[in-house]
Amino acid sequence: MNAQTPQLLAGLWVKVCWVAAKKHHRGSDKSVVFTMTAESRLRASERPTSASSDVDTDLLDAIQRRVLWLAVRMVDEANKSDAGGIKVGGHQASSASIVSVMTALWFSHLRQADKVSVKPHASPVYHAIKYLTGELDKSYLTKLRAYQGLQAYPSRTKDPDVADFSTGSVGLGAVAPLFSAAARRYAEARFGPLPSARFFALLGDAELDEGNVWEAVAEPATEGLSNVTLVVDLNRQSLDRVVPGIRAVRLQRRFEAVGWHVAEAKYGARLHAVFADVGGEAVRDFIDTMSNEKYQALFSMDNDTLRQHLYEDADSAVRKVFEGFGPADLRAHVFDLGGHDIGLLARTFEACDRVDNTPSVLFAYTIKGWGLPIAGRRMNHSTHLSTDQIQELRQEVGLTTENEWDRFDPTSPEGQLCASVGGDLNSRPPSPRPKLSFGSSVMEFAVDKAVSTQEAFGRVITRVADQDESGRVVTVSPDVSVSTNLGGWINKVGVFSPSDSDAPQDAGLLRWKPSREGQHIELGISEMNLFLLLGQLGLSHEHHDKLLLPVGTVYDPFVLRGLDAFIHSVYNGARFIIAGTPSGVTLAPEGGAHQSTITPSVGLELPGVSFYEPAYAQEVDWIMCHAFERLTGVEGESSYLRLSTRPIDQAPIGKMIADLGASLIARDVVKGGYRIKERVHGDQPGVTIVAMGAIMPEALAAATELESEGVSAAVVNVTSSDHLYAAWRRRVAVSQGSLVKTPSHLHKLIPPRERVYPIVSVHDAASHHLAWIGSALGVPQTALGVDRFGESGTISDLYMATGIDTGSIVNAALIAVLEGDASTRGQRF
């Protein structure tokens, strides 16, 4: 039997199965549902898990050939559509390299509770598997990268068949299973044992260029997660280049250095047989020492040129072995890599399972474009097969244009295995999130002393521990728990550790004793890890059927350092609360490196997140209770609170509560704001000051000073620019083509009678953040804010330097009033 015989037999077997399928099933299989008897159904828990001799490699090879065909054909079909003059794209070569890994994983190893992230460029392979196993409808196969079709990259919120992880942002999906495993470990410690689950990440070798991967694998909070396996598709090619060979060795050493178990599937069965024979060690050394660049160059050579090229560098021992192979045999052996040996892959997965004290990483050596005419070719990353090449591949797998999209015949061995796998592994909708409530408030703050919003946050979350009888609330911080005011919470609930610690406890104010009972997870200094863990804790209900209410804290400017992971987690549908504190130039002596200015724009513009910046302590209480409730139930979202360390006088909100009642003010706080000061004289020239956050004392002082100058000033306290903007946008959307009688909350805060006065907005952040309010209301506006980098100094120094102090607000208001007065007289100011 020569090297091509198994492939020819596999193709013939597929063709035989198609003939049988055509007899039993004609036309579209849109309504086909795989059913099997209880006796014939092979459940995942009963599948072989100990030795590759139990894995039918011929059967799996037939399946992987069909998976490869469907993946390639999906991309081909997508690129026949009109995308408005731009390319549709797709990655046939990157899909092909990981077909064997995914076939071995899905059809011989996975169990129902397992979770898998699939590298972005292999989404067609994933969808092909989900189609063959009965989860995905056939109609989607021709809708890759189409609107409301299959996404370019796996998406758990946009795709119909992705339940685990979105992986479009390179490097983030690669480590998401690691943090999901950490979330499950925490949930088990809190709620008791859960069904056994394993977590797999399939990633390309070039993804390991992303720094966040190394932050994650070295994170102490992920140590000991032996149910995690990263599978590196080591095809030695990135987007634009061949990856140097020494890189693989270095990567393995880096994993070993942080205590991971490193496994390798480098060569396939053909080469292992050669290595075990006479001259085999010389052949191994010859291939091992060949550079990646030289190895990749071999793919473009015909059989004779390939032999000649190999002989140029080979010694006599290697040549003697190679002389025993015919032209096709030599090619088959040289390109026989372990990442395409399904039996070896199955054995290696099992070996990783047996490691019980640390995560594993498997380096699977593969060929980019395996099984395709573009295999191993330079620059094949985005290369697509031609029409003739597609036709040749269609014939190789025994299909025609009439049945090319069909599943296997349900009565065939392939069809039966696909049905079995589908019954065991296909996604099941999670139960709806339970609806929980902490009420509208957990505490009342005194109004006779100054309090910062950061202090209020710490006191509120500590009080939440008394309300959280089920222990669902879990906090996370990247080594800033004390400086973000979580000390009281930690003293009450403890620090989480997978095992109880017998280390002596510090005698200081902070009781830091890790145990399985703790509800705070302390990370190393990595904001990416913070948001990745928050994201997976925030999906604990969907992934592990245990609802958690995660709260993270981070220095506000460093929200931007973790922004990619923040976006990724929210895009995945995770729900959590993040407190960015301290913020703005109000941080004063800390200097510009720790003074945030553009973070409010992140909160305002990021979908799936409500942004709040309260000024007063009681507002923090109301907002936190509302934010916790939004983490539960069917409809909900994440929340971002931007907080300050500046203590401010609480008397103004105390007066509002006394005059109007707490429930009314609380309602408006959640909606986005309230009028904290009314005009004294309605018959005078006027201005409306719109302020947000810690700048409120200056805004109120400016209003008082303006009154003494004969200018009547009202002050609007904005607590959520996000909610005000969203409500205004909804009103605009509804108003198109219809009359809207109900004003948005912003229109209620500044009603028509007030819109004759100009607006001055002020915020300890970029002036642009609130600059839209005037245009939304049709009112002239002057926007004050911090539009330069900060520096060290006192609050008064920095407010004056950035133009947000009381004097600057007064001057801006007077100019606005004068400009308005001049315009009404038809004059130019």
Image (tube, rainbow, N blue to C red):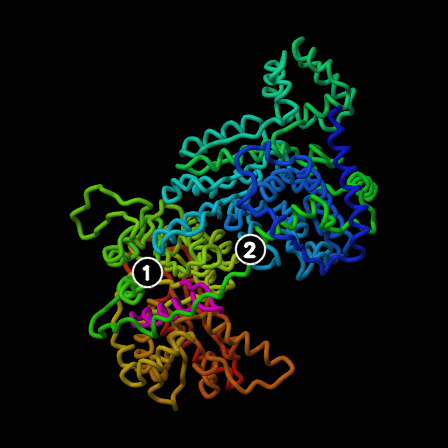
Residue identified by numbered label 2: 163
> Which x, y percent locates residue 64?
68, 41
Instruction: Give the amino acid type for the residue marked by disc 2 in the picture.
Output: Ala
As drawn, is 775 to the left or to the right of 192?
Answer: right
Q: Nearer the viewer, residue 401 or 532?
A: 401
Q: Nearer the viewer, residue 746 or 407?
A: 407
Under circle 2, the secondary element is loop
Magenta segment includes 639: yes
As drawn, is 445 to the left or to the right of 712?
Answer: left
Quarter of the image for residue 706 reads bottom left
Which disc number belongs to residue 471? 1
Instruction: Give the amino acid type for the residue marked by disc 1 in the picture.
Output: Gly
As drawn, is 508 to the left or to the right of 550?
Answer: left
Callouts 1 and 2 close, C-beta under 8 Å: no
- Mark sitting earlier along the chain (1/2): 2
- Point out the residue furthest to the top here: 316
Residue 364 showing in the rendered view: yes
- Point out the residue furthest to the front here: 39
Looking at the rendering, the stretch of residues picked out in magenta corresponds to 616-640
Q: Nearer the viewer, residue 409 or 74?
A: 409
